[in-house]
Image (cartoon, rainbow, N blue to C red):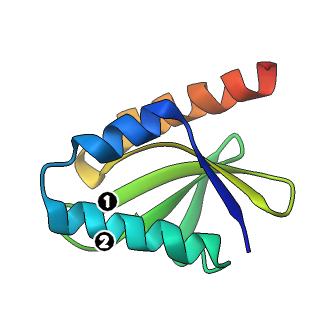
């Protein structure tokens, strides 16, 4: 079991998705993560990892793990914006470290 905390920027990104089916599928993925099933994840550097979803444009949700039970969601995007999204997620993770 994990506690999943969403940064406001992540919540804004998720809320901005226009396709209701996509949004529902990503929310289901987060619910599975809360139950302990992180699924397909990959580290992207600096302690940041991505949850990968292989449908549509290849959705990604970026997170850091704090301790053994806390996941902090940093942002999201598609495979097309992955490079930029990783830079943003790493910057947000760095700001968390400073707090």
At horizontal 80% and vertical 62% (from top left) the residue drawn is 69
> Within 10 Å of the Cα at label 1, are there few (<14), some (14-19), or many (20+) other Cα atoms?
many
Q: Which residue in the protein does label 2 denote?
A: 25
> Within 10 Å of the Cα at label 2, are there few (<14), some (14-19), or many (20+) other Cα atoms?
few
At horizontal 59% and vertical 33% (from top left) the residue drawn is 90
- The local secondary structure at tag 1 comes to strand
Q: Is residue 97 left or right of residue 58?
A: right
At horizontal 39% and vertical 56% (from top left) the residue drawn is 60
Residue 43: x and y in percent read 62, 57
- The local secondary structure at tag 2 comes to helix
Q: Which sits in the foreground, 73 or 90?
A: 73
Is 95 above or below relative to 8? above
Labels in figure, total: 2
Residue 9: x and y in percent read 44, 31
Q: Is residue 82 left or right of residue 49?
A: left
Q: Which sits in the foreground, 17 or 92?
A: 17
| Residue 46's disc number | none
Earlier residue among tags 1 and 2: 2
Residue 66: x and y in percent read 80, 49
Q: Is residue 13 left or right of residue 88?
A: left
Q: Is residue 49 left or right of residue 46?
A: left
Dot 1 and dot 2 residues touching (CB under 8 Å): no
| Residue 59's disc number | 1
Please state, as top left, top right, bottom left or bottom right, where the C terminus lies in the image. Answer: top right
Residue 64: x and y in percent read 67, 48
Is 5 above or below relative to 39? above
């Amino acid at each position: 079991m994990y506690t999943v905390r969403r940064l406001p920027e992540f919540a804004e990104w998720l809320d901005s998705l226009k396709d209701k089916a996509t949004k529902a599928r990503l929310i289901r993925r987060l619910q599975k993560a809360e139950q302990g099933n992180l699924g397909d994840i990959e580290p992207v550097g600096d302690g940041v990892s991505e949850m990968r979803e292989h449908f549509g444009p290849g959705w990604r949700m970026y997170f850091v793990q704090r301790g053994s039970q806390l996941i902090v969601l940093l942002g999201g995007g598609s495979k097309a914006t992955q490079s930029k999204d990783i830079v943003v997620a790493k910057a947000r993770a760095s700001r968390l470290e400073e707090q």
